């Protein structure tokens, strides 16, 4: 997630994006599109979790209970 | 602000961790595909068993290293942690990906345990598309983070939204 050693672009120092690149809330268009995509993904994951089609529990054998994280480590 | 030499060292560490994480996930995907594609029960079992230490000892440490080095790099430079959208997005991506990985390690343990117990005639029960789906999704989000780091798209977070105070400009690197 790191920042770079490259100098910060001068266009960003003003804190203003250029014409045609901002939405109604003043956000750049790429931010708005990314947020919409992220929201769709989150909704899909939540629906999957709620319907039981997703999540670690579905891999457990009947009657079995995972202790992996609690015990820790792969060499069990 | 960090000294230039320290900054370059931190950036190198962050790139190594982030790219290593991505490479580790690609290796994980190869093993996951093998569990679905191979007709050799021993290879399928071995792939599940190999995915477990890969997750615990490669992916998890690299994800944490990427998170720590990236945070230090952002806070130690004028980019800031919550000043630019691209840095903020990378932070969120890193946090979410590391969190999902941490949760998914439990599933990996279960899959590996099941592979250990399974007989040679139980190959069909071992096959699970979950590792392929998770690895493919991880590659997509890590590629997105890499693209953000390379292109650094414009856009600053409004000051009133920032949890961290803006840093003075001047040595923005």
Image (cartoon, rainbow, N blue to C red):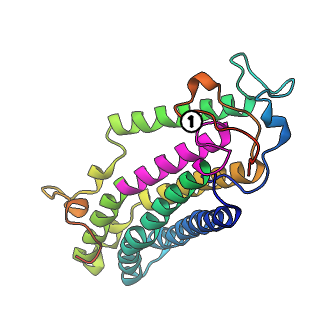
Depth check: B89 or B128 in front?
A: B89
Q: Residues within 10 Å of mark 1 (few under 14, many from 20)?
A: few
Residue located at (70% from left, 48% from top): B148
- Where residue A76 appears, as percent x and y from the top left, is 22, 76
- Where residue A64 appears, as percent x and y from the top left, is 15, 59
Predominant secondary structure in magenta? helix
Position of residue B70 in the picture relative to residue A47 (left or right): right
- Where residue B6 appears, as percent x and y from the top left, is 63, 65
Tell me: residue B2, above or below residue B96.
below
Judged from the image, the secondary structure of the residue bearing numbered disc 1 is helix
The segment highlighted magenta reads: B75-102
Tell me: residue B169, above or below residue B97.
above
Tell me: residue A49, above or below residue B38.
above
Position of residue B172 in the picture relative to residue B119 (left or right): right
Depth check: B85 or B10 in front?
A: B10
Quadrant position of residue A10: top right
A63 drawn magenta: no
The residue at the far top in this view is A24
Quadrant position of residue B46: bottom left
Q: Which residue is mark 1?
A: A38
B94 drawn magenta: yes
- Where residue B52 appears, as percent x and y from the top left, is 36, 71
Residue located at (28% from left, 71% from top): A73
């Amino acid at each position: 997630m790191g920042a770079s050693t490259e100098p910060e672009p001068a266009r960003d120092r003003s804190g203003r994006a250029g014409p045609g690149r901002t939405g109604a809330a003043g956000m750049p268009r790429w931010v708005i599109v990314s947020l919409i995509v992220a929201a769709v993904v989150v909704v899909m994951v939540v629906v999957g979790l709620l319907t039981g089609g997703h999540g670690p529990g579905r891999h457990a054998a009947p009657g079995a209970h995972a202790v992996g994280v609690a015990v820790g480590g792969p060499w069990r | 602000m960090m000294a230039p030499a320290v900054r370059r060292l931190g950036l190198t560490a962050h790139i190594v961790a982030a790219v290593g994480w991505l490479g580790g996930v690609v290796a994980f995907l190869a093993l996951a595909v093998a569990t679905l594609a191979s007709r050799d029960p021993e290879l399928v079992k071995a792939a599940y068993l190999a995915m477990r230490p890969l997750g615990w000892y490669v992916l998890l440490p690299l994800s944490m290293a990427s998170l720590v080095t990236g945070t230090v790099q952002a806070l130690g430079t004028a980019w800031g942690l919550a000043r630019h959208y691209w840095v903020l997005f990378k932070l969120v991506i890193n946090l979410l990906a590391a969190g999902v990985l941490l949760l998914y390690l439990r599933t990996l343990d279960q899959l590996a345990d099941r592979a250990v117990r399974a007989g040679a005639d139980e190959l069909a029960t071992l096959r699970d598309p979950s590792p392929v789906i998770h690895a493919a999704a991880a590659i997509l989000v890590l590629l997105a983070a890499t693209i953000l780091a390379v292109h650094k798209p414009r856009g600053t977070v409004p000051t009133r939204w920032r949890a961290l105070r803006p840093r003075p400009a001047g040595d923005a690197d």
